Amino acid sequence: MPRYKRLVDNIFPEDPEDGLVKANMEKLTFYALSAPEKLDRIGAYLSERLSRDVARHRYGYVCIAMEALDQLLMACHCQSINLFVESFLKMVRKLLESDKPSLQILGTNSFVKFANIEEDTPSYHRSYDFFVSRFSEMCHSGYEDPDIRTKIRMAGIKGLQGVVRKTVNDELQANIWDPQHMDKIVPSLLFNLQSGERTESRSPSPLQASEKEKESPVELTERCFRELLGRAAYGNIKNAVTPVLMHLDNHSLWEGKTFAVRCFKIIMYSIQSQHSHLVIQQLLGHLDANSKNSATVRAGIVEVLLEAAAIAASGSVGPTVLEVFNTLLRQLRLSVDYELTGSYDGSTNIGTKIIKAHEERQLQEAVIRTIGSFANTLPTYQRSEVMLFIMGKIPVPGIHLTLPSSDSGPEGTRMIQVMLLKSLVQVTAGFQTTNMLTALPSSFLEPLLSFSLTEDPEVRLLVLQILLSLIDRHDNRPKFANMSISDISVLKLKVDKFDNLFRLLNNIPQLYRHIYLGCKEESSGREHYEALFALLGLLSVELANEEVVVDLIRLALALQDLALSTDEALPVYNRCAVHALVAAYLNLICQLTTVPAFCQHIHEVIEVRQKESPYLLPEAVFVDSPKYVPAEYLEGSVLFLQSKITESLGGSGYNTERLATPYVPQYTEEDRLSKRKSIGETISLQVEVESRNSPEKEERTPAEEITFETLKNAIVDSVGMEEQERERRRQVVEKFQKAPFEEIAAHCGARATQLQSKLNQIFEITIRPPPSPSGTISSGYGQSQSRSVPIYEMKFPDLCVY
């Protein structure tokens, strides 16, 4: 018998319970180190004995053989170790194939020890496919005894961790990132994460928790998952994340949200920050792929995207900023269509999946919240781009829509407008910039202000909220939340110097006009007037300037005249609300200007109202159960007088001429277009616009007002005109059929001559040569006639020649 076989036999005692014979093991180790060429034979012989002992169920000797293999593996690092490793892996595989949990765990522990060894030489032919499959299977163990089941699963997790460590950095090994391997590894880890959450929810006793704290399968799984993701390179992110998405789909885990969010938090914090945008891209693609899935699934993906995007924004977002918003806005539009049509394909056939409106509403809220949360993490310049991007998506009636047209008709368009404006509210919340000119160009503010003229009260309120967020740069907005007559010193307002950059946008006069028209709307409610008060207050504080103050006071007095006007069909509540708004604002502005006479007049009027007309103050109007009476015919001491305000402010250096001039809003075609309701108004508007734009405006008569009678007469007359046209055509046809050829030729020749003469006149006018320096020549009739002289024959004065 060869010496190495005798040395191997000597390490096994007669009684396996006595364990490995250490003295003989030391001899075997010394022999292996002295004669490394024998190492592969030692491994093969140990493998042969172990296989025989497993078959004979002598598990004591199996443990001794594995212990000997482990010691030899740890001691020998020579070039011949590759052949020994093959024998070692063969024995580990034999143990893992066993039905005995103890042997499976034993084999796994030996493999983990081997995985921690850094080999000096590469291996070209080693395969770990079996170990990936077997360890993944152990992770899903369903053994009856829960304690043994937990040990088997933990052994499987450790085994997968060992495979990853052994192969991830070895370029000669089969790529562990291939989908065939990732589709086994990742679901196995997620399965244990999920099952661990269920077991942990049973809240064990403190003693049990302390004993098992070190052996928690969830912690082990999470650590293994983080290590796997941390080793992923740029090209491997997709293969690592795709199985996560598939697992969440197959087990319906999007709807619960909690587990899905936890998984992607682990992913986002584990991968390298510069790869974060790849995960965002995959989530966006998965959201699009589930466009016709239930609203709860889409809402779950959106929630995960919310968390992932917030984490990714702190690192490198990559080129996905607008892609995120584009996908979310598209999902918002689809959700609106689904809610209104009631199905995913626009039909109501039998078997079509019915949409639950409340679930779609929850999805829409989640999308809007995600848009706002992600935008809040962006720098100012990107945030401005996002605001412009969303504004370009808002459909405007009569204008080409950037978003595809909705299948749900006008109501769908309106809902999309509301949803996108709500998204803008989220994006603009907390938005602050030092350069309003570059951050908010007119291409954003002008369409935004145009929406404040619509008849939809919800749209107008959203526009006001957006304007408040844009103008408020010192967090003064919450201090104007409650409209009341009070001392503003308790508000502790932050007053800023006048912002010339904002003024350059020429949007301040537009804001005045939109405030005036907003108060004029019959559908305005308490929230609208409170928002308008906050807007007036923020303009006074953020743009603290004498000219702005004067204009705002003129605007407030114009609003008071609006509430008193009998020409306007304002409801009683709206008139009282406008009076209350004017009182609250003048109380605010007089304290900001600190002009004693101005403050005295305002306070006197407020005191009179408190005694005689409390329904003209915000404390009585802007409450849950307002009390008001008709307020058209008011006079005397309950009104703010322009003359007294002009006199009091004039003594403090304010522009009295401007104060004495009443504010009159300039109505534009934009206002008329937003308010037109009938085709008669449209036709009248077109006639007026044509007459206004005509080059012969002075010579034309004023545009005729088109009334119902005019339209009726036009319809009646059109019948006679049709008969005359029909008769004229009949005569032309008859003439060409019966008239002689010479007459037809003469007629056509006359028309051609007339056409040629007209063309000659036009050419003479448009292509007339420049005046000749040599003057004119006289025609035979005594008239002067221009003479065309070539430029090289012209005689110029000496002073004109260089």
Image: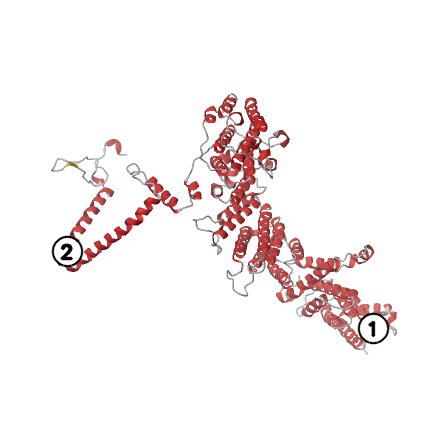
Q: Position of residue 55 (x, y in %)?
A: 79, 77
Q: Secondary structure at mark 2?
A: helix
Position of residue 300 relative to residue 378, above or below, is below
**Which circle, 1 or 2, is nearer the viewer?**
2
**Three-letter code, disc 1:** Tyr
**Nearest the camera: 686 or 564?**
564
Residue 137, given in percent of the width and then of the height, sits at 70, 68
Can residue 26 be seen? yes
Image-based side of 530 in relation to 172, left or right: left
In which quadrant of the rendered image does the C terminus lie? top left
Q: From mark 1 to mark 2, how far is it between C-alphas? A: 124 Å
Q: With 413 as the anchor, is 756 left or right in this view?
A: left
Q: Is residue 53 left or right of residue 467?
A: right
Residue at (52, 57) in percent of width and height: 341
* Residue at point 15%, 56% (across, down): 744
Q: Residue furthest top?
A: 651
Neighbor class of circle 2 (other Cα within 10 Å; few <14, some 14-19, many 20+) is few
User: Can you identify the residue that label 2 sits on?
Assistant: 745
Residue linked to disc 1: 61
